[in-house]
Image (cartoon, coloured by chain):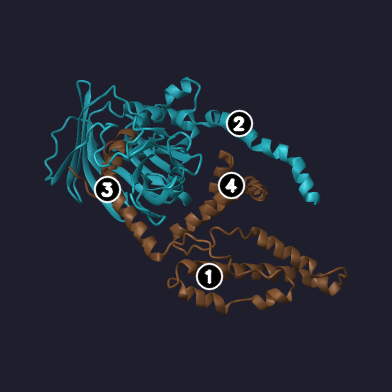
């Protein structure tokens, strides 16, 4: 992946990408497997930093979504009446919505593989919103809610807290050594030492 | 289908587009730069260790205000600096006998005049510098500079420099959405030689000239490693390399350090981040070619930069 694409991707993640960059990423995202993988990874990392649950990291849902929408479009058959033409936009919206909902459930179930206890609350909520009936009635390809038992690096809430604590500890441990270099290489004199939580002799 | 074909035809043009923009922007970077602002920057960079002064500085980080006494004495080719905390821990940091001819990479990067003469944009490729009026700081007439980053890998600054000496009197670091992360400012300043303050101190730290071979805290690692991606314009602050557990980089305004620790046992992969003012501490546990490591990036850069740097770490072949 080129430096340009990497920058564009970062810009997109920070909500700062311009129109050209967005178009380029969308165009390339279709075929460029490393780009898509990086994209997924950045999103996971950001979600982890924001503290939200991580689900489905290894599963690329894009082609399932595409298949489902194509299947939905073909479901109308050869005779396209006025009624169907009017309903089509609504129907494809419903397919897209149901795919999204299924993916959420899938994510929750995957998370459960690794963590039987942790997500019980979320799971109960997702199950009650299951739109499986609607999905089948439209003739779209039913999508498995679980993609197997592939191991998923789910960040348990405990791990998240532990890593934040670790980051704080490391800041305490390394800040003074960083300040030494910052003081000699930035224009603020010894002020970087004022950022050290506790100055040691 | 038709859409796919037209895209394929467009590809050569689309591929060329970023290149065209990049070269146009590059030429404009230097031309578009405000020469007056760059002259002020150069004056600041060149004058960092040239003046004797003392004063009181405040550092505001969120709701915390730190107050410090600083002094900088130049005598017979060496400079002596001292910072005494008047609030908080009450520690003192001394750096004495620093030779004036010893110019570190960060200060060298600020001396943009040399770069411009050599036909490079230097730091002006990484930031846009604009003179933005004048103000008074610590009783001194000051010129205001707006420093806008040209990419999202670094923060922006609003600074004020002493019109007479070029000394940095005030600096605001701001992040995404113009949010001020940290504010540093002189409350009073004098260029006269003055007796050193007599504030009571608990801890005295003698800041040494960093030596790449012996790190105070970081243990050496078992094999050489490298950071394979840096934001444009960042250079190593010292010759630290190989098995040293630390690397530090600067673009002249921002500095970050990377620390690597090895683990004997597998660790649960993950990442954590803590932010204090403009400082980001980002810690990531991962395995590099099957070996568990803990990487910490600390510095005055956005989280995204820290994460991308950590992402690029690998063992050297």
Q: Which mark is residue B16?
A: none
What residue would you read off at disc 1? Answer: A109
Chain identifier, colour cyan: B
Nearer the observer: mark 3 or 2; the answer is: 3
- Residue B117 in the image, given as x and y percentages of width and height: 47, 20
Figure check: B152 above or below B78: below
Establish whether labels 4 and 1 are both on one chain: yes
Q: Using the numbered discs, state the Cα–Cα distance from disc 3 to disc 4 in whole angstroms.
A: 36 Å
Nearer the observer: mark 3 or 1; the answer is: 1
Query: Residue under mark 1: which chain is it in?
Result: A
- Residue B215 in the image, given as x and y percentages of width and height: 26, 37
- Residue B71 in the image, given as x and y percentages of width and height: 21, 35
Q: Using the numbered discs, state the Cα–Cα distance from disc 2 to disc 4 in whole angstroms.
A: 26 Å
Q: Nearer the viewer, residue B91 or A105?
A: A105
Q: Which mark is residue B23?
A: 2
Query: Residue under mark 2: which chain is it in?
Result: B
What residue would you read off at disc 4? Answer: A34
Q: Using the numbered discs, state the Cα–Cα distance from disc 3 to disc 2 in whole angstroms.
A: 43 Å
Q: Residues within 10 Å of mark 1 (few under 14, many from 20)?
A: many
Q: Of helix, strand and loop, which one carries label 4?
A: helix
- Residue A186 in the image, given as x and y percentages of width and height: 34, 35
Q: Using the numbered discs, state the Cα–Cα distance from disc 2 to disc 1 in whole angstroms.
A: 49 Å
Chain identifier, colour brown: A
What residue would you read off at disc 3? Answer: A173
The number of discs equals 4
Q: Using the numbered discs, state the Cα–Cα distance from disc 3 to disc 1 in whole angstroms.
A: 39 Å
Q: Are the residues at dot 3 and dot 1 in contact (C-beta closer than 8 Å)?
A: no
Q: Residues within 10 Å of mark 4 (few under 14, many from 20)?
A: few
Question: Is residue B60 shown left or right of residue B250?
Answer: left
Q: Nearer the viewer, residue B58 or A57?
A: A57
Q: Of helix, strand and loop, which one carries label 2?
A: helix
Query: Residue under mark 4: which chain is it in?
Result: A
């Amino acid at each position: 992946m080129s430096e340009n694409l990497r920058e564009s991707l970062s810009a997109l993640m920070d909500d700062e990408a311009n129109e050209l960059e967005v178009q380029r990423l969308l165009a390339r995202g279709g075929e460029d497997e490393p780009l898509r993988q990086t994209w997924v990874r950045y999103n996971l990392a950001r979600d982890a930093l924001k503290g939200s649950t991580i689900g489905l990291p290894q599963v690329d849902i894009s082609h399932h979504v595409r298949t489902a929408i194509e299947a939905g479009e073909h479901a109308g058959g050869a005779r396209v009446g006025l009624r169907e033409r009017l309903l089509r936009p609504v129907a494809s919206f419903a397919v897209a919505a149901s795919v999204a909902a299924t993916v959420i459930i899938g994510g929750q179930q995957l998370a459960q593989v690794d963590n039987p206890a942790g997500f019980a609350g979320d799971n109960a909520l997702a199950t009650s919103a299951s739109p499986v009936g609607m999905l089948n009635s439209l003739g779209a390809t039913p999508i498995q809610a679980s993609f197997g038992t592939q191991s998923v690096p789910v960040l348990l809430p405990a791990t998240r807290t532990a890593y934040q604590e670790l980051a704080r500890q490391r800041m305490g441990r390394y800040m003074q050594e960083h300040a030494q270099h910052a003081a000699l290489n930035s224009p603020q004199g010894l002020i970087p030492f004022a950022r050290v939580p506790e100055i040691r002799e | 289908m038709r859409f796919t074909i037209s895209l394929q035809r467009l590809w050569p043009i689309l591929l060329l587009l970023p290149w065209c923009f990049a070269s146009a922007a590059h030429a404009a970077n230097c031309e578009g730069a405000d020469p007056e602002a760059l002259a002020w920057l150069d004056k600041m960079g060149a004058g960092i260790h040239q003046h004797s002064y003392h004063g009181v500085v405040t550092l505001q980080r969120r709701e915390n205000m730190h107050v410090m006494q600083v002094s900088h004495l130049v005598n017979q080719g060496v400079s002596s600096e001292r910072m005494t905390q008047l609030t908080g821990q009450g520690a003192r940091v001394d750096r004495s006998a620093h030779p004036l001819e010893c110019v570190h990479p960060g200060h060298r990067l600020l001396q943009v005049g040399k770069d411009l003469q050599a036909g490079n944009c230097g730091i002006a490729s990484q930031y846009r510098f604009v003179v933005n009026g004048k103000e008074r700081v610590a009783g001194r007439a000051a010129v205001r500079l707006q420093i806008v980053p040209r990419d999202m890998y670094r923060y922006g600054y609003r600074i004020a420099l002493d019109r007479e000496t070029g000394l940095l009197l005030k600096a605001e670091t701001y992040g995404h959405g113009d949010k001020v992360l940290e504010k540093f400012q002189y409350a009073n300043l004098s260029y006269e030689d003055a007796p050193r303050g007599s504030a009571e101190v608990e801890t005295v730290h003698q800041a040494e000239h960093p030596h790449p071979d012996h790190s105070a805290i970081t243990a050496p690692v078992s094999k050489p490693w490298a950071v394979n991606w840096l934001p444009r314009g960042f250079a190593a602050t010292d010759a630290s390399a190989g098995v040293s557990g630390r690397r530090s980089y600067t673009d002249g305004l921002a500095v970050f350090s990377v620390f690597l620790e090895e683990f004997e046992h597998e660790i649960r992969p993950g990442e954590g981040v803590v932010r204090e003012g403009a400082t980001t501490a980002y810690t990531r546990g991962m395995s590099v070619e099957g070996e568990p490591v803990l990487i910490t990036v600390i510095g005055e850069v956005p989280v995204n930069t820290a994460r991308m740097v950590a992402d690029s770490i690998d063992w050297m072949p």
